[in-house]
Image (cartoon, rainbow, N blue to C red):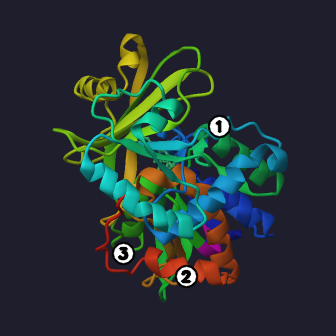
Amino acid sequence: MTTTHTFDVIILGAGSVGTPAAFYLAQAGFKVLVLESVASVGQGSNKRAIGGVRATHSDPAKMQLCSRSLEIFSTFKENFGNDIEWDRCGYAYVAYTEREEKTLKSLLPTHQRAGIRNDWYDAADYLKLIPDLNPDGLIGGTFSPDDGSASPLLVNHAYYTHACALGAEFHFSEQVIGLQVEGGRITAVKTTRDTYAAAVVLNAAGAWAAQIGKLADIDLPIHPDSHEAAITEPVARFLGPMVVDIRPAPGSTNYYFYQHITGQIIFCITPDPNAWGFNVSETSSFLPMVSRRMLEVMPRLSNLRVRRTWRGLYPMTPDGFPVIGWSKEVTNLLLGIGFCGQGFMLGPSSGELLTRLVQGQTTPADQAILPLLAPDRVFSGQELLK
Ligand SMILES: Cc1cc2nc3c(=O)[nH]c(=O)nc-3n(C[C@H](O)[C@H](O)[C@H](O)COP(=O)(O)OP(=O)(O)OC[C@H]3O[C@@H](n4cnc5c(N)ncnc54)[C@H](O)[C@@H]3O)c2cc1C
């Protein structure tokens, strides 16, 4: 493979992670090319995300990265000039059994130590916050007022336009089909149209990241896991926060829903067992399962009409945490993959972190979390708040 098209960084995939990374790398002065197999940005998992953004995780890496992403999302309008439909609605984890109460309360000291506001409310006070919750059996719940939601596609498109303004090139409908590796480095990136070279190649191919790994003859532990979501007709605003119920039930683990600023209820469920594979055809089992569970917690939703369902892919890792760091096998291959169900919220801060990795300028705070995200870690941990 020979090429005259040379860049500092080639990013594979213009999704939740690749597009913000393109912006931050271009802002840092790098000559950036983004290769995307489909016709525009955000058409992979990005546009299928429901837009939830929270710092209230159970591990230091996601708490740190999402706290930074929250700063970026909440000031996006002032700093970038784009309306991304940011809504500081907060997250509410409800507890109807002692198991959830114990789990949720056990995380509060961790959040407080990390400077993340999250408080426990007993049932009576919780109902003042979310009056439409079913009071039967309600013990209480947590509320984190600084979490919120934004539009994944608006964010992705905003980063795309700003990256282009800084000189980043995006090539759409151009799939990466080959990587030439010589002496442990990628020396050429081959697409359906051309061949390119760069000092650094960033794999940001989401659920397809392992296929990119295969092109360089390495195994990446990323598996597509299919999740379904839906949106109702819009109604007058009655619900503040994102409501999350982490009780397991037959066929599902947690589910969550919120009312968008334009009035629609948007919701999702985590299937149990996982629905592995690339199939994104909608199912007939999702809507009855999730709506039954949502009505149990909020009977007022019963007359809402569902307008649309869709299905997309979580790029899963065995431990539920992303992979951010340099490949050990191919030295100029940077990995920004395995963002599971949180790639939209992690995208902006991960784009900044990936840029610092390319610059060789990671901070002590980065260095504290990078081992937790390392490509060669033992994938044995499990997060508490999925
Ligand atoms: C129903 C649902 C709800 C979700 N809700 C949330 C949420 O509320 N909050 C949240 O943070 N996350 C949420 N997510 C998860 C989120 O969508 C993903 O974690 C995130 O989009 C992954 O980002 P990514 O950049 O890794 O992948 P993507 O956004 O999928 O981007 C990868 C890109 O790589 C491209 N690509 C792949 N192979 C190639 C190739 N060979 N050549 C060129 N290009 C290639 C793809 O076309 C794609 O555009 C949700 C996901 C689903 C399905």
Single out the residue that lies furthest toward the left: 250
Q: Which mark is residue 87?
A: 1
Q: Which residues are magenta?
A: 196-200
Secondary structure under the numbered disc 2 in the rendered image = helix
Identify the mark at residue 95; answer none if there is no mark. Answer: none
Circle 1 Cα neighbour tier, 10 Å, few/some/many (<14 / 14–19 / ≥20): many
In the rendered image, residue 186, in percent from the top left (x then y), is placed at 53, 77
Label 1 or label 3, whichever comes before in sequence order: 1
Query: Contact, CB < 8 Å: mark 1 with mark 2?
Result: no
User: Mark 2 highlights which residue?
Assistant: 368
Q: Nearer the viewer, residue 251 or 162?
A: 251
Instruction: Confirm whether residue 301 shows in the render.
Output: yes
- Say which residue appears at 82% left-offset and 57% top-offset: 166
Q: Residues within 10 Å of mark 3 (few under 14, many from 20)?
A: some
* N-terminal label among 3 and 2: 3
What's the mark number on residue 218?
3
Q: Alpha carbon of mark 1 to alpha carbon of mark 3: how far?
A: 41 Å
Rounded to the nearest angstrom, the CA distance separating label 3 from label 2 is 26 Å
Q: Is residue 3 visible?
A: no
Question: Helix or strand or loop: what does disc 1 sit on?
Answer: loop
